[in-house]
Amino acid sequence: MVKNNQHTHDSNPVLRTENLAVGYTLKAKKKVVVSGITMEFKKGELLGLVGINGSGKSTLLRSLSGLQEPLNGRVFLEGETLDQISAERRSQQLSVVLTGQHISKNLSVVELVALGRQPYTNWLGSMSKTDIRSINNALAATELQGLKNEKCHTLSDGQLQRALIARALAQDTNLIILDEPTTHLDLHHKASVLMLLRQICKKTGTTILFSTHDIELIIPLCDKMLVLHDGKCTMDAPQKLVKNGTFSRLFPEKIIGFDPETSRFYLKK
């Protein structure tokens, strides 16, 4: 699959943050969940976001996507501050797949994937040759050509997740953000989706950030990982995070240990 729109030069970060703080406002009081986030995402990187429940994974993803206002700091998307980019133009630079996102399951797979072209179609929704090519490329990249006329309600969870990824791919953006794309999948289909994400990054140069609880599975796959712990975000290559003890500190040490030799968690007796 070849991307139709190349917005960035290889040397420039696709997304960058400066002293970002994310959280929410409750009864006029700001509740900071994660703060001091300064980082860069480069072209073609596969980035995994992990942390315990309530650590702020979804809040961070929503803030990076422009769906939620950060409490402090700035987000730069392809060199521009996110809050200065119109929603229409942002949708040509950034694709988002959230958990629990409502879709009509009466759509066929190809109709669902075609929704990714909405930022480019005219007000009649007419498809150009470029739109059709992007849709077909997305179906091919996710190996869904044989299912393109099937209704979404007939798909397995794994197939539906691939279709949602295909819709994001059809959007032809340099950055895709996914919130827990492997939730509800068995081990085989988790691995299948994760390998697909890595393949997309390497073949198309797309940058992909995704959150997950499957820490052990993604350590060998990701270029970098973001770890949320105690209100801070640490980003580095997975093996460096293993060596510096980041994963060993992630869970209560009385219950769960982490073996840096095997990169696996274990229950303490």
Image: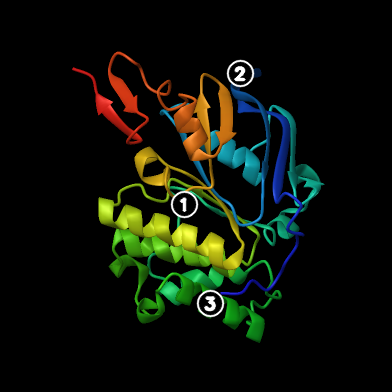
Viewed as shown, does residue 91 lie left or right of 86?
Answer: left
- Residue type marked 1: Gln
Is residue 5 positioned above or below 72 on the image?
below
Q: Which mark is residue 101?
A: 1
Compare residues 116 and 20 and report the one nearer the observer: 20
Spot occupied by residue 33 in the image (x, y as percentages of width and height): 57, 23
Instruction: Determine if residue 260 is in view.
Output: yes
Spot occupied by residue 58 in the image (x, y as percentages of width and height): 51, 37
Is residue 202 positioned above or below 233 on the image?
below
- The quarter holding residue 106 reads bottom left
- Residue type marked 3: Asn
Spot occupied by residue 80 in the image (x, y as percentages of width and height): 81, 48
Label 1: element kind: loop
Label 2: element kind: loop
**Residue receiving disc 2:** 27
Viewed as shown, does residue 76 lie left or right of 91?
Answer: right
Instruction: Determine if residue 128 is in view.
Output: no
**How many other residues sit within 10 Å of disc 2, few (<14), some (14-19) or many (≥20)?**
few
Measured Cα–Cα span from mark 3 to mark 2: 47 Å
Label 3: element kind: helix
Is residue 8 positioned above or below 236 on the image?
below
- Placement of the N terminus among the 4 image quadrants: bottom right
Which color scheme is applied? rainbow
Spot occupied by residue 239 in the image (x, y as percentages of width and height): 47, 37
- Residue type marked 2: Lys
| Residue drawn 49% across the image and 67% down it | 166
**Residue receiving disc 3:** 137
| Residue drawn 58% across the image and 82% down it | 132
Nearest to N terminus: mark 3 or mark 1: 1
